[in-house]
Amino acid sequence: MSLLQSLAQRDRVFDFMAPQASPVDVRHGPILYMEDVTVSFDGFKAINNLNLTINDGELRCIIGPNGAGKTTMMDIITGKTRPNSGSVWFGSRHNLLHMNEPDIASLGIGRKFQKPTVFEALSVFENLELAMAADKRIFPTLTARMTGEIKDRIDEVLETIGLTTLRHQPAGILSHGQKQWLEIGMLLMQRPRLLLVDEPVAGMTEQEMERTAELLTGLAGKQSVVVVEHDMGFVRSIARQVTVLHQGSVLAEGTMEQVSSDPKVIEVYLGADDEEAA
Amino acid sequence: MRRFLSLGLLCLLLLNITVTAQAQTSSTNTADDAAALELLEALDVESYTAKGEAITAILQSDDERARDWLQALLDGRLQRTDDGRFVLVLENRGRDWPVADVLTGEALGEMSRRDLERIGINNNLRNQLRSAIAVVDLYSPNVERRRISAERLLGEVDGELVQPINTLIEQEEDEQVRYRLTQAVAIYRAEAGEMAGVEALDGSLHPRSRVALSRAANSDDPVVGNAAAASLAGIEQQLKINRGLETLYFGLSLGSVLVLAAIGLAITFGVMGVINMAHGELMMLGAYTTWAMQQLLPGQPGLALILSIPAGFMVAALAGIAIERGVIQFLKGRPLETLLATFGISLILQQLVRTVISPLNRTVITPEWMSGSLVINDALSLTLNRMVVLGFALVVFASLMLIMRRTRLGLEVRAVTQNRAMARSMGIRATRVDIMTFALGSGVAGLAGVALSQLTNVGPNLGQNYIIDSFMVVVFGGVGNLWGTLVAGLSLGVINQVLEPWAGAVLAKIIVLVFIILFIQKRPRGLFPQKGRAAEG
Amino acid sequence: MSLTTESSTNFWLTRPFSERSTQIFLGVLLAALALVTILHVAVPPDNPLHVGAYTVNLFGKYLSYALLAVAVDLVWGYLGILSLGHGAFFAIGGYAMGMYLMRQIGDRGTYGHPVLPDFMVFLNWDSLPWFWQGFDMAWFAFAMVLLAPGLLALVFGFLAFRSRVTGVYLSIITQALTFALMLAFFRNEMGFGGNNGLTDFRELLGYNLRSNDTRLGLFLATGVALGLGYILCRAIVTSKLGRVSIATRDAEARTRFLGYRVERFQLFVFVVSAMLAGLAGALYVPQVGIINPSEFSPIFSIEIVLWVALGGRATLYGAVIGAILVNYAKTIFTGVMPDAWLFALGAMFVLVTVFLPKGVAGLFRYLKRRKRDDSANPDHKHTPEEASA
């Protein structure tokens, strides 16, 4: 956006002039609505005419071979990548293509990255504190105080993700699985309407996986959850609705049984021999 | 004064024809040395008028050494010793000067400048001598001399000279000399208000022609005046174009230097994400290699320069490998620390050169085939050294392009640039690629240094002056893109030169820096950005 | 750091006082100021313990450098922005002070002009340029000391952070900034004295700059400014904003996804840092008696970064230690063997980055922890340093 354009949009220059963030409108059903989205990098179409609808409170699994466009899809929803064409709506009021990352985040879309990214120099407690839904402008942040209420909320999440005893440790020393949970915990602190979870169980032990499955299914209903995952066993254990992506567009959609018996899906997966090697 | 001179010239013109003929038939010097000495003695008088007469006398003598005497007199190198001998000072630098006998031409060794006395002349005599030498030279068998002297005659022709020059024009074989002499006559005619002169000067870009035309434009004859004014307008237009071309040439030349300096940086920065602040000092090493090579091969600057190309590459590449192995490899994934450490290395290298060689600038000789300039017309001449450097930059760029596109190393380098982890899992030894890349980038810096030694002073600060500019080029062009570097380097060079005339050198530089800072607002990844997930890293 | 997070419900500015490290730092600083004052005033000049006016002046210079280093550590250590142009903010603060001091000379200059400084008379200017107006008033000049560098940082940072220029790009651009300013200030037409800069100052707020008492006063003022600057920075880094900064340093994109407008946080901290640098410059100038464009040179800015690196990033007190150590070494070296200084400086850059990435402060902490581990808890696992990036 050029300087002139941003100046022309006077309401976005100063925070106090910004219109109050309006609540997400889900009266018409879907909380996320992507239509005809296309993205290309130097001619390669990472996303090709993608259409996807997520209902409020739904738990949706998205599977697909490497390069199917799963991560790029999340980049588009969170504002990191701008599509070449198409439209993306959050509820029926917010056009995500007109918003930047922090705006989208404060609107209630939380994202867990493929590679767990926690703030390693900060303690587990501080990681959760930063993630918490709060006034995130500069001066409120500078003068923010730690109230009992906030502490209780953090303790509650610490309990949920099972990291209470490690609360004062720097996040850098956590194991891989613990970092994944901390990330999920940070998402919970944000109280998002929609959670995007990228490969939550990669590198986890069997037990850790079970706990994660519990965590995610426990969230659905209150929040909408989109899980991108490679591990078929894990997907089978949590999924009600599954979407199969292939070459940037939707190949099949339905319950796990429906899609796994779909001949197109079988062909794609038999042809792709490195699906586990992500 | 003028009248006296032109008379002298006329006599000389007629006389000299015979002198040249004589000199061509008999190569041995038969003139009487005693008579010659007498001519020279006449120069050593107080009165400048008497000196002028003595000069005329020398011109009228048929001594074929006359030209050399007059030239020496003009340059202040005709001097007299305490014991009354006339000597020619060969080089007047330092305390003791090598001298030669004027009459015999025999070298007399060095003499202290205190034992010598110069034969002084004033400005009038200087002008007289210049014209006289020009006319003498018109008869020289050497084409180069005839060309120079013909150019000197522009604006010096008077009514009495027109006729003999016209005769000369008919006899002259060289195209350029003929053109100049014709112009010289035309200038005289135009200034005299003659239409023929004005017509002949149409399209001439020489500054003296313009003076003549503007005088003719004030002529009483309106026809001549209008024609001259029209010609002048056309010439102004031509000059504007030529000035534009010259700016473009200087811009491209500066740009080629920037490209040379930046392209090695683009490779190391693009592939390894490493900012090498010692890059400029690697260039400095290349320049000093050229200097050292010329010290090793005295008297053969051309050969030394050619040998410096591989040598400069090797020296800088080895230094680069030492830096990579010694420091950078320990700072993987910490680009900011790498920047600081390499800055430290740059300080050490600079100080090393200051201590070991000298804090002063060293002179690197420009070989003959690179000095001089290519004359396009009177308003535009392109210096050869800049042209060679421009060509060299393009050759280096093309070779790098070939290495990147056509060799195994290039393939591996591109693979590592795009995805280090993936490349490694494919069996590419990323460490080896790092070393090779760094050596290549550093070697190119060495080449840049060799080229720079032909354009600027070679000193310990040589690299420092280019490092910020080179980074600007890389940032402007887009990291990891050689084409971007080329386009960015050349265009920054041209922009700088275009701005300079009306903003001044310093302000032009500031404007360019501000421009780049603003440009990055618009395109944070440069002119030719890499796209895709890998680029976001 | 993590221990204070939960318990600190008090006012953000007073929070640093409950920290042990700040208490120690302020204690040492106050003790040093008191000691130097006593040794200068109370000990007779013939006593070997006497601290001369020259040394007091030198210490004052070190303290202003230390404040500058704290400013750089705030952006580099906590925000991950390696500014190679902080010398520019320092110099601009210095020029603002210099302009005030020039106007204080009044008609006592060589040319005796009642208003125009000598160099303007020399350049045949007949009136004061607009940007010199108001600098005869101390309050205005002192405000400019903070506002001018702050404004430059605001404009530059706004442009840079908005388009997400970070990492080495930002370093290079900041270097270009200070380089461009250096070229500009070298020009006589700029109206800042060109090559020679501003000098021949006489008095500050009516105190004669050449008197020993003024020098002691300036030294103490610089010490107080350093203490206040340190507390301010400490308050920022221990606040939630400080934790957002660290989060930005380590994972900028992640912080953005949490809903923080990273570029505004960067801009805020950058501007605060620039103002502190300007203040340091303003305290430096009356103590050295001159300000010229060489303070803008890229090498000076990068040297500041070395002080911080040597002392230890992201500690603030490390920056102070580093600034004093390096400049003390510089004083010694340039006196004894000037040629060797650049070798030593270059070697320091390499050695610190390769062998001592956490600086002297990191070394302290390592030794302290090892002692504790050996005596109390042999099984304790070493935790990664805060400044792991």
Image: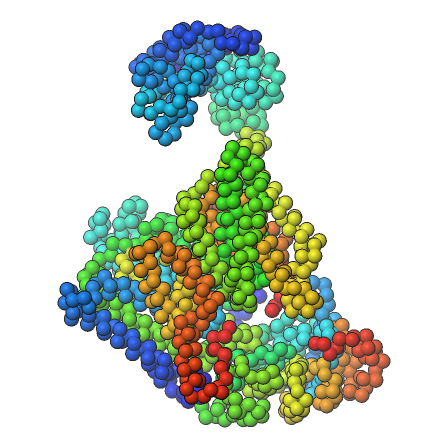
Q: Position of residue C174 (x, y in %)?
A: 46, 61
Q: Position of residue C335 (x, y in %)?
A: 30, 56
Q: Is residue A187 visible?
A: no
Residue drawn at (39%, 66%) of the image: C307
Specify the quadrant of the image occupied by residue C106. Answer: bottom left
Q: Is residue B325 left or right of residue B50?
A: right
Nearest to the observer: residue C40 or residue A35: C40
Residue drawn at (33%, 14%) of the image: B84
Residue drawn at (44%, 55%) of the image: B348
Look at the image and tell me in which quarter the N terminus of chain C lies: bottom left
Q: Position of residue A180 (x, y in %)?
A: 61, 84
Nearest to the observer: residue C105 or residue A266: A266
Specify the quadrant of the image occupied by residue B384. Answer: top right
Q: Position of residue C355 (x, y in %)?
A: 46, 68
Nearest to the observer: residue B47 or residue C379: C379
Q: Is residue C345 visible?
A: yes
Q: Is residue C346 left or right of residue A205?
A: left
